[in-house]
Image (cartoon, rainbow, N blue to C red):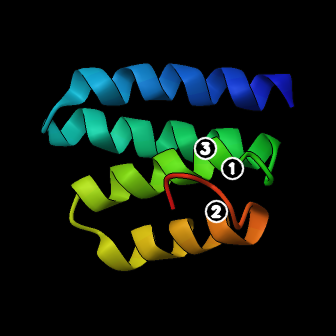
Amino acid sequence: RLRSHALNNLAHLRYVEAGSDYGVLQETVEQYQRAIGFDETNVDAWYNLGKSLEDLGLREQALEAFTRVLQIDPAHPGA
């Protein structure tokens, strides 16, 4: 679980730095997916994955990630 949260935090820093850089956004998607692989209940990783996918224009995949956020935490402030 700790590893999942560490990966999420690192990916989030890259996301903030990315702006609209497609390549960096792709990397953050992969990092969030790795974080989720370690802990499928990491709501922040799911939320951040959704934001990254949305920024890449992958709206259906983003919606799936946001749906997972609400399944884990119906009161999540971002979803």
Q: Nearer the viewer, residue 26 or 67?
A: 67
| Mark 3 closeness class: few <14, some 14–19, many ≥20 residues within 10 Å | many
Q: Nearer the viewer, residue 50 or 71?
A: 71
Q: Mark 1 vs mark 2: which is more N-terminal?
A: 1
Q: Image quarter for residue 4? A: top right
Residue 43 drawn at (x, y percent): 68, 49
Rounded to the nearest angstrom, the CA distance separating label 1 from label 3 is 5 Å
Residue that label 1 marks: 43
Please name the residue shown 54% across and 66% down the image. 65
Q: Image quarter for residue 44? A: top right
Please name the residue shown 81% across and 45% down the image. 39
Asked if residue 29 is positioned above or below residue 68 in the image, the reply reads above
Asked if residue 58 is positioned above or below residue 50 in the image, the reply reads below
Label number found at residue 64: none
Rounded to the nearest angstrom, the CA distance separating label 1 from label 2 is 6 Å
Rounded to the nearest angstrom, the CA distance separating label 3 from label 2 is 9 Å
Residue at the far bottom in the pictured view: 60
Looking at the picture, which amino acid does disc 1 mark? Val
Looking at the picture, which amino acid does disc 3 mark? Ala
Please name the residue shown 38% across and 80% down the image. 60
1 and 3 marks in contact (CB < 8 Å): yes
Residue that label 3 marks: 45
* Badge 3 element: helix
Residue that label 2 marks: 69
Disc nearest the viewer among 3 and 2? 2
